[in-house]
Amino acid sequence: MALTLYKMDASPPVRAVYMVIEVLKLPNVEYVETDLLADDHLKDDFLKINPQHTIPHLTDGNFQLSDSHAIITYLMNKYGKNSDLYPSDPQQRAMIDQKLHFDSGILYPALRENDEPIFFGTATSLKPEGVAKIRSAYDFTEKFLTGSQWLAGNKLTVADISCVATVSTLNELLHIDEATYPNICAWINRCAEHEFYKNGNQPGLMEFRRLLKIYLAR
């Protein structure tokens, strides 16, 4: 049965799932546009399948699943069992899971604190405390990448895919200075060389940039 993904291209969590779908080369995925800025996520039909009214949301037959990290690991467990992107070794997987929690607990909250007042409020600039939260997220990421090309070991994993969707978007809000964060910049460039990034992240990132420019110019 075909998978259905409720999505909005500008959303970093959606783009993270896109990239995993791209890597796994999953066929016959149906995409349902769910525009947060038009309150599509608050409509009754969507609330019935996802009371949290968040995207991405995945439907696999009668199975409903929200949260990008849960969706990513579900897809890997079902379709990528032998993949180095999410290996079965307990310690390797634990390190990947830790970075996925880092994304949901540190990186993405830094993004939400800064972009929600712009897209869902009247803000046209970042507050100092919001900037500080982004810089703190950058600091952690830079340290994680010290001595390693990837976030969770010596190979590309879904931790990199998930986190780069968020970090590349944070960069649209607060530029990542290469002199201060050389590891992050090199890591983003490594990720950007892959087709999954070019096809799964870059178009939506450009859409985020376009929308941000419009909302900041109000």
Image (cartoon, rainbow, N blue to C red):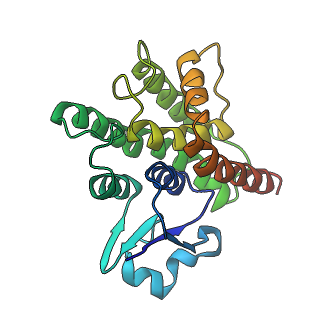
Residue toward you, 66 or 3: 3
Residue placed at 58% from the left, 21% from the top? 186
Q: Which x, y percent locates residue 141? A: 46, 26
Name the quarter where the N terminus is drawn.
Answer: bottom left
Name the quarter where the C terminus is drawn.
Answer: bottom right
Q: How many labels does the image show?
A: 0
Q: Which x, y percent locates residue 184? A: 54, 24
Q: In this view, does 32 lie to the left or right of 4?
A: right
In the rendered view, would you say 85 is above or below 144? below
Residue 134 sits in which quadrant? top right
Q: Which x, y percent locates residue 129? A: 55, 36
Residue 61 sits in which quadrant? bottom left
Residue placed at 43% from the left, 68% from the top? 57
Residue toward you, 115 or 99: 99
Residue placed at 57% from the left, 56% from the top? 11
Residue toward you, 178 or 132: 178
Residue placed at 77% from the left, 51% from the top? 216
In the rendered view, would you say 66 is above or below 97? below
Q: Residue furthest right?
A: 217
Q: Is residue 3 left or right of residue 22?
A: left
In the rendered view, would you say 205 is above or below 121? above
Q: Which residue lies furthest to the bottom in this view?
A: 44
